[in-house]
Image (cartoon, rainbow, N blue to C red):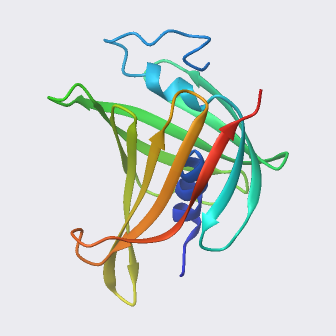
Amino acid sequence: MRVNRKTAMVVILVGAFPVFGTMQRKPVVADDPYAPLALYDGKWDSVTTIGEKESVRIENHCARTGLFFVCEQMLNGKTGSLAVFLPVTRMASGGEEYKITGLSADGSPPGGWNKLTIDGNRWVYSWEDSENGKRVFWRNVNQFSGADKIHFEIQRSDDEATWKTVKGGDELRVK
């Protein structure tokens, strides 16, 4: 599987990210589209169980900066990227849709805006890439089990209808 820098940032951030004060520290306000994003803040241990096995300590420092919500992410003690979220719309189901982009600590040019859809405990990050001139669709599906556990699956599709899981695992909040 070929994954470019932009894709890797989204995968790390979300697949771990996926992909950030917790509900225990800060109550969720129904009209605040930024409140769910605060779940990522803190330290997480991520273990891959589907695909190449790896274990990573993720530390997210997140804050609302005004219109934007940002999370600086450290991987195994080293700053990797800054994720920038922008709320787009409230869905009929009550969920939220966001645009998300990342800035790499190595100063390379940022990628374009991707999409995050939060509907209850299910968060889906989605983006497009190309392989040999053909569009390829990716998504990282995060399923929260409370504020301290995330199961993630990174999936690939050629048609946005049939998805194949290429990587997955679990993240647990470090207390």
Front residue of 85 and 139: 139
Q: Judge by depth and name the residue closer to the eye, 102 or 56.
A: 56
Q: Nearer the viewer, residue 145 or 158?
A: 145
Q: Quadrant of residue 138?
A: bottom left
Q: Residue furthest right?
A: 77
Q: Quadrant of residue 87?
A: top left
Image coordinates of residue 57 in percent, x first then y, are 78, 47
Question: Split into 4 quadrants, where in the image is the C terminus?
Answer: top right
Image check: 9 left or right of 69?
right
- Camera-nearest residue between 149 and 57: 149
Quarter where residue 112 is shown: bottom left
Q: Residue at x 45, y 35 (%)?
A: 85
Q: Can you say whether 18 is above or below 108 in the image? A: above
For residue 173, side relative to residue 168 (left or right): right
Point 56% across, 27% down: residue: 147
**Residue in the image at 48% along x and 47% along y:** 101
Q: Would you say residue 37 is visible in this rendering?
A: yes
x then y, percent, for residue 143: 45, 43
Q: Is residue 109 above or below residue 80?
A: below
* Residue found 58% across the figure and 48% down from its top: 13
Q: Is residue 153 left or right of residue 113?
A: right
Q: Is residue 68 visible?
A: no
Q: Position of residue 35 (x, y in %)?
A: 45, 19
Q: Residue furthest left?
A: 92
Residue 58 location (% of width, % of height): 73, 44
Relative vertical location of residue 27 with respect to residue 65 in this rendering, above or below: above
All told, the count of numbered labels is 0
